[in-house]
Amino acid sequence: MSSKPVLTVDRNFEVEAALAYHDEDAKATIATLLGDIKHLRLQLALAEAAMSQGMTRGWKPKFERDALQD
């Protein structure tokens, strides 16, 4: 059994839920998602500045996701 169909169903559900939350207004949905991205990038930058290298054992956060990730 492949995990791809499950991901597709979950992603479709998430898209429909986001649109429904904004009364099917795609621009409002996108604006909210962009605001969320901005907020999370700021939180990531703050966490990176606050964490020591020893705490993360050399791990550094990425602000851009890999092209192959969903």
Image (cartoon, rainbow, N blue to C red):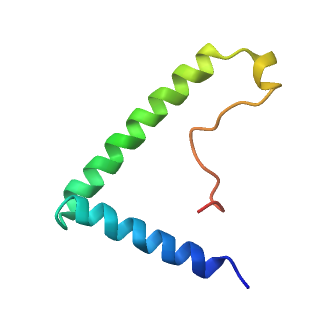
Across and down, in percent, residue 42 comes to: 45, 28
- Above or below residue 48? Residue 10 is below
**Residue at left 26%, top 49%?**
31
**Residue at left 59%, top 77%?**
6
Give the quadrant of the N terminus.
bottom right
Quarter occupied by residue 23? bottom left
**Residue at left 66%, top 62%?**
68
Give the quadrant of the C terminus.
bottom right
- Above or below residue 39? Residue 49 is above
Q: Is residue 36 rendered to the left or right of residue 62?
A: left
Q: Is residue 55 rendered to the left or right of residue 62?
A: right
Q: Is residue 45 rendered to the left or right of residue 29?
A: right
Q: Is residue 43 rendered to the left or right of residue 29?
A: right
Residue lying furthest bottom: 1
Across and down, in percent, residue 28 comes to: 20, 55
Quarter occupied by residue 27? bottom left
- Above or below residue 55? Residue 40 is below
Across and down, in percent, residue 62 comes to: 63, 38
- Above or below residue 17? Residue 41 is above
Numbered circles on residues, count? 0
**Residue at left 31%, top 61%?**
18
